[in-house]
Image: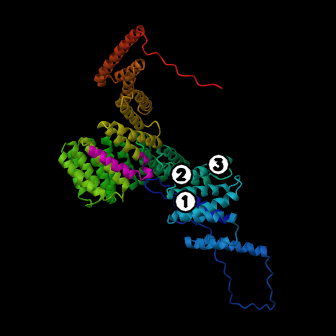
Amino acid sequence: MRKLWNSLSLVGRRRSISYFSKSYTSDAPFNCCTKTHGLLIRPNNKFATTPFRNMDTLVQKPSPIPSRQRKIMGKSQLEEAFESAETTEEMLKAFSNMEGVFEERELGLASLKIGLKLDHEGEDPEKALSFAKRALKALEKDNNNNTPSSLPVAMCLQLLGSVSFSLKRFSDSLGYLNRANRVLARLQDVGVVSVYDVRPVLHAVQLELANVKNAMGRREEALENLRKCLEIKEVTFEEDSGELGKGNRDLAEAYVAVLNFKEALPYCLKALEIHIKGLGMNSVEVAHDRKLLGIVYSGLEEHEKALEQNVLAQRILKNWNLNADLLRAEIDAANMMIALGRYDEAVCTLKGVVQQTEKDSETRALVLVSMAKALCNQEKFVDCKSCLEVSLGILDKRERISPVEVAEAYSEISMQYETMNEFETAISLLKRTLALLEMQPQEQHSEGSISARIGWLLLLTGKVQQAIPYLESAAERLKDSFGPKHFGVGYIYNNLGAAYLELDRPQSAAQMFAVAKDIMDTSLGPHHADTIESCQNLSKAYGEMGSYVLAIEFQQQVVDAWESHGASAEDEFREAQRLLEQLKKKARDASANELHMKALPNELPIKALPLPHKS
């Protein structure tokens, strides 16, 4: 089976991986194979014919071939037929013939090859899974973990992870991929396999791990796997390779997905630099980089820079007649104009875009949502609502077709109603959003964000008891998706604290505010306005509990933090000082009252609790 392993080594280097929804894809030479065989095919042996008659009258009988040799020749021919098969049907037929001659442990590589082929085609994942499991069983039986044959085991585990991912069996996929990762790490430590053989499989495993973790909502963990993918590319390709450009952009997109625009920026700039150097200023890759860079700058609230990159991207997209991408870029540009307060310009841009869209298309709905945003900022509420109603009519018909895109649009529309103080409508739309996202396991992070917004609006409208389960659910989901120290998680705990304080549960409130402050200290810094606010809330909660020493300590931190802002926060500084003096007065009054109470007869004697029984 050596020739079959050689062919599989080639497949391992060129293996393609397919994904659903927003996922990351591998690149050449990790992903450049359109056929999964790539085998060495021997030319057909034909008898050489001659026009001359053999005049030798002595006929020699061929010597008999031993049965063992005949069996070896038969195996070789079957293997040759399998190697030369191109279609799945031909491969399955040849494999069926091999089953009658080869032992099960000898069929491991052939089973793996068929599994890879089926996974690449993506039409019958269950069948691919059965071949992958059969291959793993055979290869593990034929493997002592100290030879290069461990590499096919890793490839097999990676295939099982890929197929399980396609079947949305994410826990199974994660288990197989983690096993593959351990096998590859062991191979690298032992050094019995060439690093050039291991890298492509390791890259595929890391990429699959990133996609599975994203699908499970564990986006912060997925970032680490994507960083490893980029590291593998950096030691594999030249520093100005297009593969490195794509790898940097993938990582930038992943950071944008977790709203970490600061970390996304250098990777996005690096991708742009590589693509300009290798492909020129007017390539499609450069346009995609500039679009992403515009989004990053928007996230950093550098809207002028964002708009500049967007305009440059539009020019390239126009040159290449990529109309769908161009329309999206124009919508993004209008949103950037709105962020800059250029509302009339944004409306004018959107009017031009809407004429290029189909009547019931999602793009038209998105254009109308952006137009409503501009009109809402101009306080043209009647026109704003008209746009939103038409948009909702379109989106309602698209829920089953594009649930994630519709959910995002509903969320955006709810913000417009929220701005117009129509909170019940906003909450209703967010609940529709949540219902759509709950059916999409890979959207757990969005589900958490929407739950947080529902909780906040319920809190705002006085429905405190209803708000708490939404806020608690949001905290758990966002911790899983973005990590326990993400600033978004801090805001949720701050709102939970406010809810408990409203319900006269200051001790629970203090616990929530303390968690919020700790997160915001880490993610935003102790002098950020929202961190100071969480510290102020913590002081208030301790004040409500009568723990004035702690309340004064945290209020002093608030005073010091506002003072560090200088003249720009003079009003906040004065208010913080006023509250500090108020707490000190309450503490003195409480101390005097305590001394007075000690002088009085003890009307409520302390009840001693019984000690636990001892044998």
First in sequence: mark 2 vs mark 1: 1
Residue 422's place in the image compared with 529, above or below, is below
Which amino acid, mark 1?
A: Arg
Callout 2 touching callout 1 (CB < 8 Å)? no
Residue 435 x, y percent position in the rendering? 37, 51
Residue 371 x, y percent position in the rendering? 24, 49
Residue 150's place in the image compared with 59, above or below, is above
Q: How many marks?
A: 3
Q: What mark, if any, has residue 399 been given in the picture?
A: none
At numbered mark 2, what does the secondary structure look like: helix, strand or loop?
A: helix
2 or 1: mark nearer the eye? 2
Residue 343's place in the image compared with 589, above or below, is below
Neighbourhood count class around disc 2 (C-alpha, 10 Å): few under 14, some 14–19, many 20 upward: some
Query: Residue, x 37% and y 55% (percent of image)?
Result: 403
Q: Main secondary structure of the magenta part?
A: helix
Separation (CA) of disc 3 from disc 2? 26 Å
Magenta range:
424-445
Query: Residue, x 52% and y 51% (percent of image)?
Result: 207
Q: Mark 1 points at which residue?
A: 15
3 or 2: mark nearer the eye? 2
* Residue 427 can be seen in this image: yes
Separation (CA) of disc 3 from disc 1? 20 Å
Q: What mark, if any, has residue 188 been given in the picture?
A: 3
Callout 3 touching callout 1 (CB < 8 Å)? no
Residue 251 x, y percent position in the rendering? 46, 47
Q: Mark 2 points at which residue?
A: 171
